Image (tube, rainbow, N blue to C red):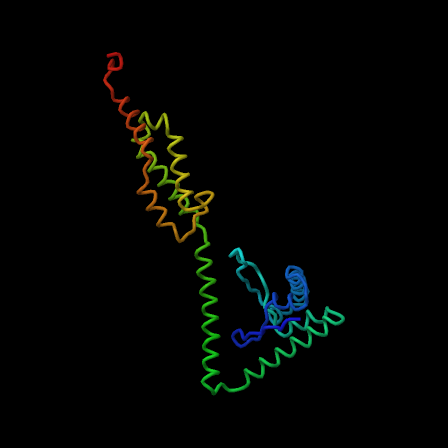
Amino acid sequence: MSELKVINLEGQLVTDSREVAEMINRPHSELMKSIRTYIEYLGQGKIPYSDFFIESSYQNLQNKTQPCFLLTKKGCDMVANKMTGEKGILFTAAYVTRFEEMENQIKQPISSTKALLQAALEQEERIGFVEGRVESLENNMRIDGGQEYRISKNGKRKVVECLGGIDTEAYKEISKRAFSQFWNEFKRYFEIPRYGELPKVRFDEALQFISEWSPNTAMRMEVKALNAQQHLPLGSEQQ
């Protein structure tokens, strides 16, 4: 059985549900299901579940945000009370010992340089963790409806402009191919399946991409030829 990690969260000692699941050799998803059941029972009794369990989250290996819980000593008591046999005894001994050790550390005055440095390092790690979560959320947040509308509108306007307008022969003949070329290049450049999946942080870059986009050489020549035919004098084709 691995050692249980207990942290001081703004004066509240807690441990991660993932740590508990690993210690008691139980799938984290099953433990989460049990905790949600405990919370439901506590709610029925009008008992604040935050005294036992605190909702939290973490980033998995695929960089996706997943839910978890932080368990207080009371929360560990509740989990342990549902366990029997050797696992229950060992888990109880482990969490009681670790919580008492942390409580004793908090009671002791920080007087040495080493203790001060350790406290500062832990604070820096917590700040780094929070900043990392914020950055991850910002990088993965998708554009909103208004931004999606602007991209769609600007993209259509750019393609029409490159074709010479909606009244041109080029627009009538090859507008579908032009739009297809534009959106395919847009999605390939930003590595997304559809433009609505564009990360919010790249919205300005998307507007710049649209502003600078133009069809490939073959299509530009085709547009020029089609629009030139539109302005030929009557009877010029027979000459």
Residue 72: x %, y % from top left: 61, 72
Q: x and y percent of residue 213 in the render?
A: 32, 40
Left or right, 137 with respect to 79, comes to left
Q: Residue at x 58, y 84 (%)?
A: 104
Q: Quadrant of the C terminus?
A: top left
Compared to residue 99, the image places residue 147 above or below, namely above
Task: Report the residue at 42% width, 43% height from top.
Answer: 188
Q: Residue 148 appears in which quarter of the rendering?
A: top left
Tell how many labels.
0
Q: Would you identify the image quadrant in which residue 28 lies?
A: bottom right
**Taking 27 as reference, is 198 above or below it?**
above
Outermost residue, top side: 238
84 versus 171 height, above or below: below
> To which quarter of the image does residue 120 belong?
bottom left
Which of 233 and 125 lies nearest the eye of the viewer?
A: 125
| Left or right position of 98 against 237 | right
Q: Is residue 157 left or right of residue 137?
A: left
Residue 209 location, x and y as percent?
34, 44
Quadrant of the frame with the N terminus: bottom right
- The image position of residue 170, as x and y in percent, is 33, 27
